[in-house]
Amino acid sequence: MSKDPLLQPYQLKHLTLKNRIMITSHEPAYPEDGMPKDRYRAYHEIRAKAGVAMTMTAGSAAVSRNSPPVFNNILAYKDEVVPWVKRLTDACHDHGCAVMIQLTHLGRRTHWNKGDWLPAVAPSHEREAAHRAFPKQVEDWDIDRIIQDYADAAERMKEGGMDGIELQAYGHLMDQFWSPVTNTLDGPYGGSLENRMRFSLQVIDAVRKRVGDEFILGIRFTADEDLEGGITPEEGLEIARRLKATGQIDFLNVIRGHIDTDPGLTDVIPVQGMRNAPHLDFAGTIRKEIGLPTFHAAKIPDVATARHAIAEGLLDMVGMTRAHMADPLLVKKIAEKREDDIRPCVGATYCLDRIYQAGDALCIHNPATGRELTMPHEIPPADTRKKVVIVGAGPAGMEAARVAAERGHDVTVFEAAPDAGGQVRLTAQSERRREMISIIDWRMDQCLARDVRFRFNTFAEADDVEGENPDVVIVATGGLPHTEVLTEGNDLVVSAWDIIAGDVKPGKRVLVYDDAGDHPALQAAEIIANSGAHVEIMTPDRSFAPDVMAMNLVPYMRALQDKDVRFTVTYRLKAAQKSGNMIKAVVGTDYSKFTEEREFDQIVVNHGTVPMDELYFELKPNSKNLGSVSQEALIFGRPQPLDANPGGDYALYRIGDAVSARNTHAAIYDALRLMKEI
C-alpha cells in the first residue's frame, strides 16, 4: 500500500473515501434545461474513473424558484432532476467515487429578471454589487417556504443516489442571515448571533428529518468574511462550534472572504500571480479548534501543496478543483508515480471568468474539459505512422506536436525564435502572468519524451518544409500585431506587444488605445505605469477589456489604480499626427460627430493580430486538400477528406492565429480536434 499521504483512505461517517483528494462543489454551467444531462455526467465520470475519491457537483444547485441561477445551474427544485442525478451518481459510483451536491438559496446573489421573474429575497434591502438586484426583505412566510424547499431538494438528491449534500453559506442566503452587513432584520432572525443563525439551524433540522441520520450533511461556510462589519474569525469559530453542537453536521468546508464584489471573489478564489493556498493555514485552524472533518479548496494547484495539507493535518480532504479541470487524470498520474506528466493548472481562471459572463467553464489549455463526449483526454494511437511537419511553436503548434507525437507520428517542428512559446512566452514575461509559461513547458516536456525534433532559429520556407517529405503539414505561424487602424499616422504608433517584449521603451505621456479588449493592452499599460509615466487607456467600447473578464481584471486594477492612469470608454482614436516632439491624437466617438485633439509622446495600439500566412499560401498548391478543412469532419470527429487535389504531396492545414486572431484556448482546441484524427 502506498505511503503517500494523499493516497490514504479516509472514513467520513459510514463512507470510506479511497484517498484524500476531492473535487469541491462547482458549477461548470453544463446543465441542459437545468438538468445534469450527458455532458455533465461525462465531465464528472472521467474524473471518477481516474481515481478521485469524491466529486461534488453543482456550485449551488437552486432549491427555490425565487433563487434563479445567474448562470446555468442545476435546478434542484424540480422533480425531473432525480433521474439525471441518478445517472450521474451511478456512473461515478461504478468507479468507486463518492458523489455529493451543493444545495443553496442564493438570496440577494441573483436578479429578479431571471427564471420566473420573482423578486430576490434577503435579510435586508441592500443589493449585492456583483448582481445588482435590490432584494425584498424576507418575510416569515418566505422563510417557512424556503426551509421546506431545502428539505424537498435534499430528499430529491438522496433519491438520486447522492452520498450526501453540502449546504452553501458563503455569499448566499444562509450567511446573509449570519452577517451583520447583510442582516437588518428585527425579531427572531436578526440581532444576536443566535437569532442570525436561526434560519440555518432550522434548515439543517428540516433536512435531517427528511433524509435521516445516515445521509451525509456538511456545510461550506465563510469563517471570516474579511469585510468591515462582517463575520470576524472569532465569530466564524463560534458559528462552527454551534454547527457542531447540533450533532447533525458531518463536515465543514472552509471559506475565507466575501464574494459580493469582483475583488472579494478573487481573494476567495485567487487567480494567477496571487499566492497559492492563501487560506490553507486558516482552514487548518478551524479543523484544530472544531474537530469536525474539514475540507478546503482555494488555489491548491499542485500535488506538493495538496500533500502538505494532508501530511501536516491541516485538512482531512483537499480540494483540487481547477487542477482537475486542467488534468482530470491527476489522481491516476499520482498513483502511477507520473506526477511530472500532470498538466498544470496555470491559474488563468478562464474557467470561472467564462461562467460569470454566462458562458460554460473551459480550461485555457485543456480543450477536452467540458467536451468529454467529443474530445479525448488520452490520445489514442494512429493506425498508420505519418511524417508530420509543424511550422510554429506557439500554443497551437506545440499542441499539434504533442497530439501528433502521442498518436505515434514522426514529428518535426520549425520555429523562427530561439524558444517555443510565441505570444504565451511574451505574456509570461509579466511577473503576475509567469505561470502561463507552463502551458508551453508542459507540452515541451511531453514532446521531448516522444522524440519530437525541434529546429529553432529557423524561419522555415516552402523548400525547408517540402524537403522533409511530409505526409502532413501544419502551419501554426501565429500572427503579427495589427496596428494599421487609423485614417492617418499608423507609422507613428507602436503595438502593445512592442511594449511587452521590451522592444520599445515606455514614453512619459502615453495613450494606450485598446480596440481588442484582451490582455495585451492592460499588460502594456501596467508596464508603462510602473515606469512612472502618465497612461490613458482608451476604448471605443462601453467597457474596457471585456475579454479579460471579471476575476482577471482585479489584479490589473490593483496594479494600476494607485498610478497615474486614466480610463476612457466610448471614444475612438481616429488618427495620429506629428506635432513637434509630441503626437497629436485625433479622438472621435461612434455616438456622434464629436472630435477633439490631445497630445501624447507615445501611442500604443492593441487591435489583435493579422495572420502570418505567406508560407501557407506558398504550400497550398502542392497540397492534397488545397488547404481546405471540412467543418463537418472537424466538428464530428472524422478524418479530413484529401480529394481536392489528388496529385498533391501532403495534407496542409493552418491553425491558431495563423487563421485569425483569437485566444490561447481557441488555438489549442484547433490543434487537438484536427490532430486527433490524423
Image (tube, rainbow, N blue to C red):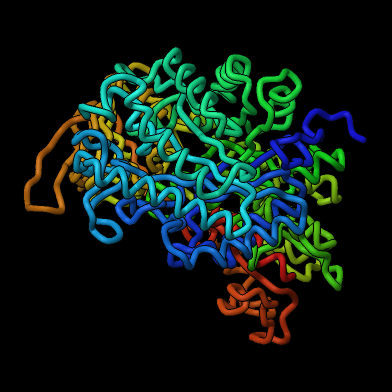
**Drawn side of residue 334 relative to residue 517, left or right:** right
Judge from the rendering whether residue 16 lies leftward or rightward of residue 123; answer left or right: right
Q: Nearer the viewer, residue 210 or 293?
A: 210
**Residue found 70% across the figure and 65% down from its top:** 675
Q: Closer to the camera, 48 or 381?
A: 48
Q: Residue furthest right?
A: 1
> In the picture shown, does residue 631 fall above or below 121?
below
The N terminus sits in image quarter: top right
Residue 50: x %, y % from top left: 76, 51
Q: Quadrant of the C terminus?
A: bottom right
**Residue 606 visible, this angle:** yes
Where is residue 367, by image quadrant?
bottom right
Q: Closest to the observer: 554 or 454?
A: 554
Q: Residue at left 42%, top 40%?
A: 203
**How many labels sit on residues?**
0
Question: Which quarter of the picture shows residue 649?
Answer: bottom right
Q: Position of residue 628 (x, y in %)?
A: 59, 77
Query: Where 358 sits versus 334, above or below?
Result: below
> What residue is rendered at 76% in x and 41% in y?
16
Residue 67 drawn at (x, y percent): 33, 50
The residue drawn where x is 82% and y is 69% is 382
Q: Position of 646 compared to 544: left or right?
A: right
Camera-nearest residue between 627 and 242:
242
Residue 417, percent across and down?
65, 42
Look at the image and tell me whether residue 354 can be seen. Answer: no
